[in-house]
Amino acid sequence: MWAVFWCVLKRDLLLALRRRTDVLTTLFFFIIVVSLFPLGVGTERQVLQILGPGVVWVAALLASMLALERLFAADYEDGTLEQMLLTAQPLSLLVLAKISAHWLLTGLPLVLIAPLVGMQYHLSDTQIGVMLLALLLGTPILSLIGAIGAALTLGLRGGGILLALLILPLYIPVLVYGAGAVEVSRIALADTEPYLLLLSAFLLAALTLAPLAAAAALRISLE
Amino acid sequence: MFEIHALECRRGDRRLFSNLNLTLEPGTLLHVRGRNGSGKTTLLRTLCGLFTPEAGEIRWRGESIRELAEDYRRELLYFGHLNGIKADLTGLENLAIAARLDGDPVAMADIWQALARIGLRGFEDLPTRMLSQGQKKRVALARLMLSRARLWVLDEPFTALDVEAVALLQGLIAAHIADGGLAILTTHQAVPLTSGQVARLDLGD
């Protein structure tokens, strides 16, 4: 069963390798959005330190949103998604593989670049460490929940905007606890634990439920 | 082996067909005919389980395909209007992935052989976006050679193919039928389908 998971994961990574621009646009979008704020609100250290965690998280939300549209769209257009629905494999497993590949390509680069953008906001080393961890837990949730929306809006005209309206409200808990963890770590590192534990719980719940929901949504969208 | 019982399909408010009954025995070819928009593709997609019918039931080996789900899909090969191949992958990669997802991985040598037989020798490791329409279709049709599915559902398989490829595909279908397989297809072209038992179904009257 896992052989199929690896097969789809490798396929999507290979496709991304042959079409690199898609990956880079998400990353550059994130970097640009994060960098715009210091230019807009001024370079005052105090202000930036307060704004930092929230801005990084909102930018991560928008960047992951931007990439979501392409999660199933390409496979939908060339008919490979239809073929996936007709294989003898559990669709939710294939969907999970696609989401994993999507996170590796769009989520993980954001996590890795986050320390660099954190420095623009004069965040301390501890804060950057916590932010890294929170993003590592939070960005897969964004991909997982987003996949449900991407599956539901597949093939609709103006699906992009609808996707944003559907999914952004669902991102709120991740935003609150993700940014909260970084905010709290400014005062006491030990206080971040509940935030990170809650994010982990969200991640586990999303990991088990989202692929099932996305698979069901795909079946409806392809009808 | 394959039964359709009182099937009814709707697209929006329009009823495409209703009370459709049909039984197919192994070694039968069903040729679905009808004018454009008469519901041929919808019928084929329904038979694959991609589209939910308004009423009625489809049975495979006596059991409803809804309940069989994955066990039914293992024995099914659907060839639709879209080729279902990735333009950025080579023919070899496309077929290897398709075979793996179908649950029966095939040896690379078999894939090379299938591509050679379908007339794509020398094009095996080119990304399929470099190929012509007909060649892309050939890559997709090479799946027929590699699959062990008993039921083939082919939606307009002959379009964009040249004379030679049409003959090859006819041969493949004939061999599949002779082997006790089932094939359901639509085509507007006057392609003689004389393999084994041929049943016809006319939609939209």
Image: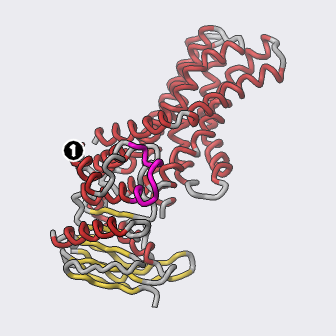
Which quadrant is home to the C terminus of chain B? bottom left
Looking at the image, residue A171 lies above or below residue A184: below
Chain ID at mark 1 = B
B170 relative position to A59: left or right: left
Which quadrant is home to the N terminus of chain B? bottom left
Looking at the image, residue A69 lies above or below residue B39: above
Residue that label 1 marks: B109
> Residue placed at 39% from the left, 44% from the top?
B90
> Residue placed at 34% from the left, 76% from the top?
B57
Query: What is the quadrant of residue B171 in the picture?
Result: bottom left
Q: Is residue B132 magenta?
A: yes
Q: Residue furthest bottom?
A: B205
Residue B163, position in %: x, y?
A: 35, 69
Q: Is residue B75 visible?
A: yes
Region rendered in magenta = B126-137
Residue A75, position in %: x, y?
A: 48, 50
Q: Is residue B123 magenta?
A: no
Kind of residue sitting beneath label 1: Ala
> Residue placed at 21% from the left, 73% from the top?
B62
A123 relative position to A36: left or right: left
Residue A201, position in %: x, y?
A: 48, 31
Looking at the image, residue B141 lies above or below residue B24: above
The one of B150 and A212 positioned closer to us in this rendering: B150
